[in-house]
Amino acid sequence: MLRIRFVDRIGSIDPALWDALAGSDDPFVEHAFLHALETSGSVGDGAGWVPHHVTVWQDDRLVGALPLYEKDHSYGEFVFDWAWADAAARLGIRYYPKLVSMVPMTPATGRRLLVAPSAHRPAVLGALVDGAFQAAEARGASSVHLLFLTDGERRDLAPFEELRPRLSHQFHWHNEGYGSFDDFLARFRSPMRKQVRKERRRIEEAGLEIRVLTGPEIEERDFRALYRFYRLTCGKRGSPPYLSRRFFDAIRDGFAHRAVAVMAYRGGEPVAGSLNFEKGSTLYGRYWGCDEEHEFLHFELCYYRLIERAIDGGMARFEAGAQGIHKLRRGLMPSPIHSVHWVRDPLLGRAVSELLPREAFAVQREMTELAHHGPFRRGEAS
């Protein structure tokens, strides 16, 4: 007999029980990362991401979980529904609060439907979806959104007709069996290959020491610098810094084994860096910033060094974050992003359902066109 239980603090769940569901390739759904968001104040009432996780139990065994947040805004999601909220306002329909399943402020493909390997997956999936609808009813939410799903989860959710599929895209790097970075570049058309080499050469000539650090190699001063860089980048973009200093401290203390920092030093002092995370076959780029401005430094610290690491480690995929068409010329190709959505109001729900197939067709055409302008020689697109 399966029981649904709602959890407002992930700290109330035994980390070992939760992480037994987390899988082999997604660091962000691990207990320590989600706990760091909550305990640092980056997530909670004041941030507009209120935890209301769905858990499924069989006797005293945790067999399923769905990270879920009640939201009163649409910031930090990167699968944009601002137009839906605007349409609701014009129709006199209340759009907030809504319920969102993703890792807050983390636009990375990952597992949302966490199911114990030994459990009966269809039954647990049904309980998790039912739990999400129960939460929507209890919280008076207008809608439910499961974002950045894996392709397998997209297929798992297809039988749930209430959950309407949506397609968007990001730029990801995929490993085609490259033996080295030069092997990767050899697939580029000549002008684009020369451009990448020029960009890397310019950084070599800038007098910076660049190091790729993992785990305990990332010192406390590096984490302090990475937080400073993060705030500087937010300021340059005119966006509020969602993540607090305490979040970076928590990552240093309890999650550094998943972290990869690419740091640039001058005279032994950090002047730029990117903080990334890896697990299993996937590497994820997350936060970046700098004290010194150098043309192409962003590409070196956020793309090229990480692609090298992925190749050397035999990883299958590198996700460099949301947006950024400049990634295309550097070998990160358009890749589908899957989500599913339920809208309570019949009128708005019908409009969304009619929109999504047309939107998906346009996204597919855009991805095909973008791929045509990628760096790879014709017939060798990654």
Image (cartoon, rainbow, N blue to C red):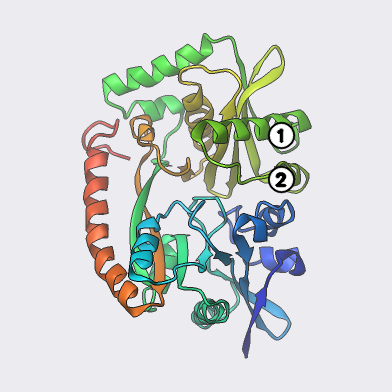
- Callout 1 crowding tier (Cα within 10 Å): few <14, some 14–19, many ≥20: many
In this rendering, position of residue 214 left or right of residue 180: right
Image quarter of the C terminus:
top left
**Farthest bottom residue in view:** 1
Which of disc 2 and disc 1 is earlier in sequence? 1
- Callout 2 crowding tier (Cα within 10 Å): few <14, some 14–19, many ≥20: some
Q: Residue at x 70, y 11 (%)?
A: 267
Looking at the picture, does residue 138 appear above or below residue 88? below
Task: Name the foreground residue: 95 vs 373.
Answer: 95
Mark carried by residue 223: 1
Asked whether the viewer can see residue 328, the reply is: yes
Q: Residue at x 76, y 69 (%)?
A: 12
Image quarter for residue 332?
Answer: top left
In this rendering, position of residue 338 left or right of residue 13: left
In this rendering, position of residue 18 left or right of residue 382: right
Amino acid type at circle 2 is Ile
Image quarter of the N terminus:
bottom right
Task: Name the foreground residue: 156 vs 103.
Answer: 103
Tag 1 and tag 2, C-beta contact below 8 Å:
yes
Return the x and y of residue 221 as percentages of the image width and height: 76, 28
Looking at the picture, does residue 211 appear above or below residue 162? above
Asked whether the viewer can see residue 161, the reply is: no
Image quarter for residue 225?
Answer: top right
Return the x and y of residue 362 as percentages of the image width and height: 22, 53
Return the x and y of residue 173 as percentages of the image width and height: 41, 40
Mark carried by residue 95: none
Q: Where is mark 2, residue-wise?
A: 251
Secondary structure, mark 1, is helix
Q: Residue at x 51, y 65 (%)?
A: 100
Find the distance from the CA under tag 1 to the CA under tag 2.
9 Å
